[in-house]
Image (spheres, helix red, strand yellow):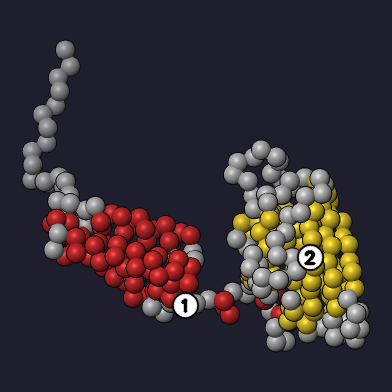
Amino acid sequence: MQLSAPPHSAHRDSAFELLQRVLPLHDGSYTLMMDLRAPQQARLRVAVCQRHLLYDAACSSSVVSVPGGDPQWHHFSLQFTASMPDSAGAWPPAFGFLSLRLLAGSGDAIDIDKLHLFDATGRQLLHNGDFSDGLARWFFAGRHYFVPWHIDNLFLEMLIDQGVIGLLLLLALLALAWVNLLRGPGRRHDFAPYLLAALTAFMGIGVFSSLLDMPRAAFLFFLLLCSALFLNGHAVVADPRAAPPAPVQEP
């Protein structure tokens, strides 16, 4: 597998990263073996991390310098001593990742093959380390510079993340919510116009922006969507003209 550098820019050092999720990592030693070669001298940052999305909980990393201009493969064996904040048995366990990143200022490309990651018991943690199945089990991430990776369309984002079934389910839920707010029992509720406006505005903005990749915005959207689906009848509003309750006399 050839890992190429992005075009020269201020974000080059953080724009591309090759990852594979491994078993939850705990305190202990890990051994990484791999074959590398590069047309120009290059530096590869290799890390074993606990991570949620792009946020590291703990990392043990090393930088490998690969000489350039040599068509022969160079074999590297690295030892990592991981000190992870989550001890064995903690719940929920933090996900473990192997991270590979071509550093800025080095070569424009590096070839990677025969990756093996072993824990202290000698158990192999990686899958498809020789890339015989293409990029199966591997994926790319953008760190700190997410603009090139944004889809900027809610519906296309759902199609890519959840597939056709996920997109159709979202559209069906939205249709049911709109029907309930416009023609169903929910139209009589005092909150109906506001929920309708909120859901419509969210969909309108979603045509030009990615929204569900932000956890707070996604949670609020699904909360309002569920509220619109189950809305029924009028809200209970106190009548300001009603007489106040009679005071209770103490014996």
Q: Camera-side residue: 248 or 62?
A: 62
Label 2 sits on residue: 115
Residue 110 at x, y percent in the picture: 80, 79
- The three-letter amino acid code for the residue at tag 1 is Asp
Q: Residue furthest front?
A: 132
- Upstream in sequence: badge 1 or badge 2: 2
Quarter of the C terminus within the rendering: top left
The kind of secondary structure element at disc 1 is loop
Residue 3 at x, y percent in the picture: 74, 78
Residue at point 42%, 57% (across, down): 219
Quarter of the N terminus within the rendering: bottom right
Label 1 sits on residue: 152
* Classed neighbour count for the residue bearing mark 2: other residues with Cα under 10 Å, few (<14), some (14–19), many (≥20): some
Residue at point 75%, 58% (across, down): 48
Residue 245 at x, y percent in the picture: 12, 32
Task: Note whether 174 is above or below 72 in the view shown.
Answer: above
* Residue 83 in sight from this viewpoint: no
The kind of secondary structure element at disc 2 is strand
Answer with left or right where residue 192 lies relative to residue 215: left
Q: Camera-side residue: 128 or 119?
A: 128
Q: Which mark is residue 125?
A: none
Q: Are marks 1 and 2 in contact (CB under 8 Å)?
A: no
Quadrant in the rendering for residue 50: bottom right
Quadrant in the rendering for residue 185: bottom left
* Classed neighbour count for the residue bearing mark 1: other residues with Cα under 10 Å, few (<14), some (14–19), many (≥20): some
Residue 187 at x, y percent in the picture: 15, 60
- The three-letter amino acid code for the residue at tag 2 is Leu
* Residue 237 in sight from this viewpoint: yes
* Badge nearest the viewer, 1 or 2: 2
Residue at point 68%, 63% (across, down): 20
Answer with left or right where residue 55 lies relative to residue 251: right
